[in-house]
Image (cartoon, rainbow, N blue to C red):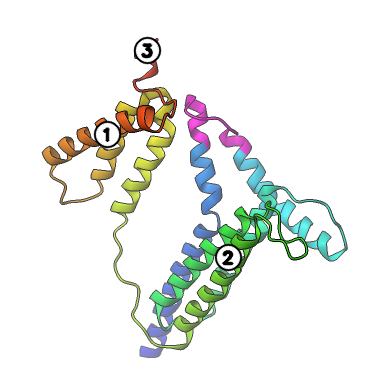
Amino acid sequence: MADTMGHSATATRNTKVALGFCLLAIAPQIFELIWSIGTIFGWGTGRGPAAVVTSHATALLAGAPSALFGSFGGGAKKASSEVLLALIYSYPLFAVAILTLFMTIRSAQDYVGGVVLMALALLALWASSDLQGMRGFSFGAGTAPRMFGGLLVALSAGIALTGLLTDGPAMAHYSWRGPLFVVAAILFFALAIRPLGVVVTAFASFMIAATGSHETRWLEAVIVGACLTLGCAILFPYVLGLPMPMFPRFLIQ
């Protein structure tokens, strides 16, 4: 009875970890989808949400398998960026997620940490896939990122393997509030800098990031945010010479 309950608990934990890896496998596509929502409100340029969903869904379900089987058949057609993202990043992580369902994880922190590092390495390999590689003995722009990315893949695989072979600590409690609000502040700054200007965007981004901590003292946060906003207003246009709007577009017009 105890063995059955232990096996059931392990299967439940593995299922949650596998689902997390599946979400990690499509994280870049989700990020681009969230970014594309800003185009609806005129906060950025690029493809709309419908085009992003269609292109990535087509790449995952049809384009990547076609390119994969075409390479075995000797085809030399150049793959699109979405297809390369699916082949280099998403598919390996989906494979890891499937294998996780059938494995006994003895050190969850090592295993999950290794897979997350592997995801970063695979993302670097995809980002450098369109850069020029080595030609003879001369290094291209993509040589170093691919070398370091490949090395990180090997090291992260070793860390994940350690989590399967040796006993270690389980997953510790992790608070998502801090990273969530910091990422929200970064996205807000990137989307709002043009329509709202440096002054409003910098101050609002700092206050959004400050919301990520229970220990925030709001009076001090407002004072620090105002000082940082003043520093940004001096740094960007006058010190760095960047042509950034200072105030909201509707006030200038």
Q: Which mark is residue 231?
A: 1
Identify which residue, 215 or 236, lies in the foreground: 236
Helix, strand or loop for disc 1: helix
The answer to which of marks 1 and 2 sits earlier in the sequence is 2
* Residue 136 point in image, percent of width and height: 78, 64
For the point 41% across and 40% down, which residue is it?
Answer: 187
- The Cα–Cα distance between marks 1 and 2, rounded to whole angstroms, is 36 Å
Find out whether residue 180 is within the magenta segment: no
Quadrant including the C terminus: top left
The answer to which of marks 1 and 3 sits earlier in the sequence is 1
* Residue 176 point in image, percent of width and height: 32, 56
3 and 2 marks in contact (CB < 8 Å): no
For the point 37% across and 25% down, which residue is it?
Answer: 197
* Residue 69 point in image, percent of width and height: 80, 62
Tell me the magenta residue range.
36-51
Which amino acid type is marked by label 3? Ile
104 with respect to 178 (left or right) = right
1 and 3 marks in contact (CB < 8 Å): no
Q: Which mark is residue 149?
A: 2
- The Cα–Cα distance between marks 1 and 3, rounded to whole angstroms, is 21 Å
Give the number of callouts: 3
> Looking at the image, is 39 positioned above or below residue 96?
above
For the point 49% across and 24% down, which residue is it?
Answer: 42
Which amino acid type is marked by label 2? Gly
Q: Residue tagged by mark 3?
A: 252
Find out whether residue 45 is within the magenta segment: yes
Q: Hey, which residue is sitting farthest right in the picture?
A: 74
* Residue 73 point in image, percent of width and height: 87, 63
- Name the mark nearer the viewer: 1 or 2: 1
Quarter holding residue 239: top left
